[in-house]
Amino acid sequence: MIAAPKAAPGECSPAVAALAGAREIIDQALNVEVPPGADESAAEEVAALWAQLDQIRYQALARMARLYARGAVARYSGYSTLDKWLVHHGKLPTAQAKDLARLAQNVHEETLPATVEAVEKGTVALGEAVVIAKVTDKAVQTRDAQHFPEEQEYRGGFESALVAAKQERPALSVNQLQAVARQVAHRLGPHRLDRDHEAAHAARGLSLHETFQGSYQLQAWGGSGDALVVRAAIDTFTTSPGEDDTRTRAQREHDALIAALRFATTHTGCTNVPAPLAQIRIVVPVQTYLNAQGQEVPALDENGRVIPAGVVHELAADSEVVRMLTAPPTGQVLDVSHSRRLASARQRTAAFHGHTTCAHPGGCEVPVAFCQADHVTSFSRGGRTVVANLQPLCGPHNRAKYQRELRTHQQQGRGRDHPPDRVAVPPPRE
């Protein structure tokens, strides 16, 4: 008599036996030749099967988290953490095992209730739940503790927003979900975006490298506001593809950038452009525009992306400001009117009279022809667009003046309300 081979512990459990039986059925179903015209339904079957496997993996992962919390598995297996156990038994890469273990820990500690509910309903897949757990933990760790002192409250709001976005748009991919997470973090804490933008702007740079093969490579990096300007310039000079145009989109945008640079070098001072200018539309609440302390309503571009308040002020220096009055409960626009910020040509001529270079008090040799019409008392703080309140400032000194005023305003706002700062008018430079 031949003895039956000894089964490994767990292989005779009802769950494993049921899964083994299901595998035989699945093997038979998947090995059948798909008839012509049935590809779509066959693909949907595979997708549904994949979702069921995700549910099994999720349930197994949650069970392992509970077992590891009791400590016995770590003692008998020799693996001190769940991610190490997953690497060995699940044959997973270390990074993937760590992400799964993170999710398992959050599920066990009940810190992701909305995600757990969505996974059980099948509206969020296992891979998406892993991303939600990872980005939520990171957002909690990097949050502005001064504005969000309650960690659990912030975690709950952040996680709920991600799950709601996925349920609202089921087609969101994992990469898109990560992009949504960045937007959620910026919407919850616009001050964080201003800080990130300031750091990115401080680290800005450009590298132009000519190769020996007669080509070149251009790389530029900086703040998000600069990206808006670059994109607007490219859109202005990008032409629609014609019937015989074989260029790719990337090639057409490269040609548009070259066209914009050529225009800049050959049409200095020219106000005529070859095509209608692209517009950068930003909606910003007036309190955010005025840098009110504690204001948490962000500025948004037309695609719903959060824009730093500092970028709004920089762009507004050369933009047309449109004031809209809305009804608070519904957001319905009640009235639209213009508030002129840009100086007219006559105002510039009169305000720049007596100046030959930038009016920065410390001295600057940039000619007035290349200067901006700066408001001595900032437009955002009630300064009017009149000759007496205008002076020529070059772009860098104009931005530096704004950053200095913003820091002063924030420091004063921590104590008590102060009237808007006024910057002394520098004497005309001969």
Image (cartoon, helix red, strand yellow):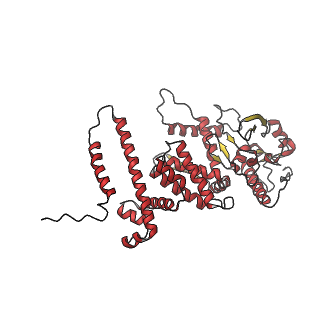
Which residue is more in the foreground, 54 or 312? 54
Residue 368 at least partly seen: yes
Q: Quadrant of residue 45?
A: top left
Q: Quadrant of the N terminus?
A: bottom left
Q: How many marks?
A: 0
Taking 244 as reference, is 349 left or right?
right
Residue at 73% across, 35% down: 333
Identify the residue at the far left of this view.
1
Q: For this rendering, which residue is in front, 20 or 270?
A: 20
Q: Residue furthest front?
A: 14
Q: Position of residue 225 (x, y in %)?
A: 65, 47
Q: Is any atom of residue 323 visible in this view?
A: no
Judged left or right of residue 171, residue 43 is left
Tell me residue 274's x, y (percent): 64, 31
Percent of width and height locating residue 356: 81, 46
Is residue 133 rendered to the left or right of residue 282? left
Q: Viewer-proximal residue, 112 or 209?
A: 112
Q: Nearer the viewer, residue 424 or 125?
A: 125
In this rendering, the answer to whether 92 lies above or below 44 is: below
Q: Residue at x 57, y 35 (%)?
A: 238
Q: Residue at x 54, y 40 (%)?
A: 254
> Residue 111: percent from the left, percent from the top?
55, 59
